[in-house]
Image (cartoon, rainbow, N blue to C red):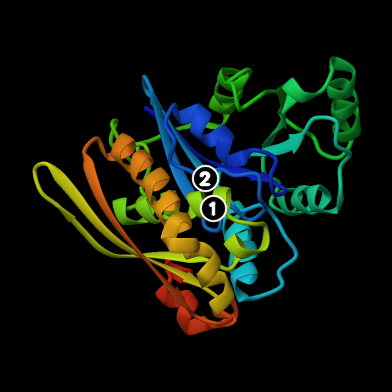
């Protein structure tokens, strides 16, 4: 038996969560085209034969502007210090920026083995992919370079195969059937937040948090009561929408995904509340789950 912990690192919106989902063959990390979609570390477990990969999806590295941002940056630092190797995900055709160099600096300080994963090759030509390889080849001694298109799975098996070199002999940390260590409540909350990210204007979703207040299951029905917190009364009105239509749409999309994931009928009850500046309030951050237990 072999196992290993492998971090997935990169700037926002390079496709880290999409890659994690593609490797697992199951959607456990929410995705959107907005930055800061992932706020906490998400564990994905892939077991193949005698090998067990434990992938740790991290938030995109940002310049923290509030206490929530500080939490996200600390999550990345802690993860780098705990893993056996990492996947550095970059976007094909995009030059290395300050964030990419910061990530490389952090893994170099830990002398962490790394694979360079060049994502979104479906959007550019081969010449651009080649140039991206040249742009990064002297920045770090990568163990491998793998071009992929995570959105359609192209090249993803190659990432897994290359990551296998970092596994070490030892007892698995998870059972063979596990795919994540996220509690079901957290998965439900993240599904709702994904729908907020996908249906609302750019600024509002970043000021929202979702807390599951009730999660009860019978043989035929899963009942969930969730509270959506935002920072302004005007944002609350937008989330609810005229005659409640926006909130209804968010709930419908979320319920469909939940029923697919949990494999049963879901009754979803959504409420919207205002907590001003919660992203800079330690008490609210702790209450919403952004605390040392999640690092």
Q: Earlier in the sequence, mark 2 or mark 1?
A: 2
The answer to whether residue 268 of the structure is visible from this angle is yes
The secondary element bearing badge 2 is classed as strand
Please give the residue where the numbered disc 2 appears in the rendered image: 56
Foreground residue among 74 and 13: 13
Q: Are marks 2 and 1 in contact (CB under 8 Å)?
A: yes
Task: Judge whether 147 appears above or below 77 on screen.
Answer: above
Please give the residue where the numbered disc 1 appears in the rendered image: 82
Foreground residue among 103 and 12: 12
**Image quarter of the N terminus:** top left
Foreground residue among 7 and 1: 7
Report whether 119 appears left or right of 224. right
The total of numbered circles placed on residues is 2
Residue at horizontal 90 percent and vertical 33 percent from the top: 135
Residue 39: quadrant of the picture: bottom right
The answer to whether residue 295 of the structure is visible from this angle is no
Residue at horizontal 31 percent and vertical 56 percent from the top: 185
Pinpoint residue 99: horizontal percent, then vertical percent.
80, 53
Report whether 191 appears left or right of 197. left
Mark 2 residue crowding within 10 angstroms, few (<14) / some (14–19) / many (20+): many
Residue 171: quadrant of the picture: top left
Residue 34 badge: none
Pinpoint residue 96: horizontal percent, then vertical percent.
86, 42
Residue at horizontal 42 percent and vertical 44 percent from the top: 253
Task: Judge whether 249 appears above or below 265 on screen.
Answer: below
Task: Judge whether 97 appears above or below 260 on screen.
Answer: below
The secondary element bearing badge 1 is classed as loop
């Amino acid at each position: 038996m072999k196992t290993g912990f492998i971090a997935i690192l990169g700037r926002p919106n390079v496709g880290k969560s999409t890659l994690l989902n593609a490797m697992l063959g199951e959607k456990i990390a929410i995705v959107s085209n907005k930055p800061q979609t992932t706020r906490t570390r998400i564990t994905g477990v892939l077991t193949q034969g005698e090998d067990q990969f434990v992938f740790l999806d991290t938030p995109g590295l940002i310049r923290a502007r509030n206490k929530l941002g500080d939490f996200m940056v600390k999550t990345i630092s802690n993860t780098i210090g705990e893993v056996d190797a990492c996947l550095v995900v970059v976007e094909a055709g995009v030059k290395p920026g300050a964030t990419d160099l910061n990530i490389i600096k952090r893994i170099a300080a830990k002398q962490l083995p790394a694979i360079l994963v060049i994502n979104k090759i479906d959007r550019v030509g081969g010449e651009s992919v080649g140039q991206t390889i040249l742009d990064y080849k002297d920045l770090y001694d990568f163990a491998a370079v793998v071009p992929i298109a995570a959105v359609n799975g192209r090249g993803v098996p190659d990432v897994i195969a290359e990551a296998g070199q970092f596994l070490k002999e030892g007892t698995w940390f998870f059972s063979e059937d596990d795919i994540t260590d996220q509690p079901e409540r957290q998965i439900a909350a993240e599904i709702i937040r994904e729908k907020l990210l996908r249906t609302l204007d750019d600024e509002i979703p970043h000021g929202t948090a979702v807390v599951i207040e009730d999660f009860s299951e019978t043989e035929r029905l899963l009942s969930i009561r969730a509270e959506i917190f935002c920072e302004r009364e005007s944002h609350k009105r937008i989330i609810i929408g005229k005659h409640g239509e926006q909130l209804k749409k968010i709930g419908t999309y979320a319920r469909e995904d939940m029923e697919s994931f949990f494999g049963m009928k879901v009754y979803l009850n959504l409420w919207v509340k205002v907590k001003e500046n919660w992203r800079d309030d330690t008490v609210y951050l702790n209450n919403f789950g952004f605390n040392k237990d999640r690092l």
